[in-house]
Image (cartoon, rainbow, N blue to C red):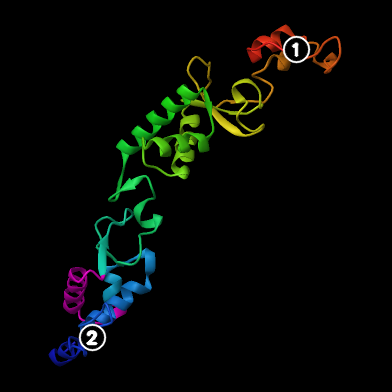
Amino acid sequence: MSRSSEAAAMKRKRPNMDSPTEGLVDAERIVLDVVRSKKNLGVWVAEVKKEANLAPTIVDKSLTSLVKKKLIKQVVNIQNKGRKHYMAVEFEPSEDLTGGAWYSEGKLDKEFITVLRDTCLKVIEMMKVATAEGIHDFLKKRKVVECTSQQVAEILNSMVLDNAIIEVKSTGLGEYHSIAVGSVCYRSASGVALGTGPKTIGQMASIPCGACPRISLCTPNGIVSPQTCVYYTKWLNFEF
């Protein structure tokens, strides 16, 4: 690009007091349009230079100026940390760039993950049995750890795979009385014999009925019934 062309590109337009882009030169407007067009994906500086069709030095100066004017920002792309990536300030980086909620400033937030894992385990041990929603509500109300319900669900899933906790389904009885029947919930794996893979307890495995040899004879008002079953009464921990 000739000097005359560069001068034309840097030519200022008449200021518009109602516009946040007041006082931008032509080159800055072109570069800003390119960056904005990429929305929350942002754009690599080399792509800006290619699409803007301006001299590299002009693009570099424009990017620097737009950052100072707080119209664009530099963001970290975890897939290409060595590349300068820009985005308009009105957008937030997509998870493709940031790595999602588990990353902070382009780095895996190991400290946060550890704190959330330890805290979820403590809540489960305290509550004996809990759902992901229940754990998140507990953390939110007590402001123990600032996190989303999705993060809690993901950390619980990883803990199940690591055999730190076990996934069960509520029977609606005993310890599960406050949890809807069939709802997925979690218990501590402490004291439970586990193999190499994640374990799941069925709805009948945690109550005496699941192993009772006379379950086929059990009826509400029969000789064998929940009302007269000693084992069932002890399991519920209260008397009829």
The C terminus, quarter of image:
top right
Which residue sits at x=52%, y=38%?
A: 133
Whether residue 46 sits left or right of residue 222 in the image: it is left
Which quadrant holds residue 76? bottom left
Locate residue 117, reporting x and y percent. 40, 32
| Magenta highlight: main SS | helix
Q: Distance between the residues labelled 2 and 1?
A: 83 Å
Viewer-side residue, 128 vs 63 = 128
Please say whether residue 58 is one of the residues in the magenta stretch.
yes
Task: List the residue tagged with mark 2.
Answer: 26
Q: Say whether residue 116 is visible.
A: yes
Highlighted magenta segment, given as a residue range: 50-71
Whether residue 67 sits left or right of residue 93 in the image: it is left
Locate residue 204, reporting x and y percent. 69, 22
Viewer-side residue, 126 vs 108 = 126
> Is residue 138 depicted above or below 49 in this figure?
above
10 Å crowding of disc 2: few (<14), some (14-19), many (20+): some
Q: Say whether residue 197 is visible.
A: no
Task: List the residue tagged with mark 1.
Answer: 212
* Type of amino acid under label 1: Cys
SS at mark 1 in the image = loop
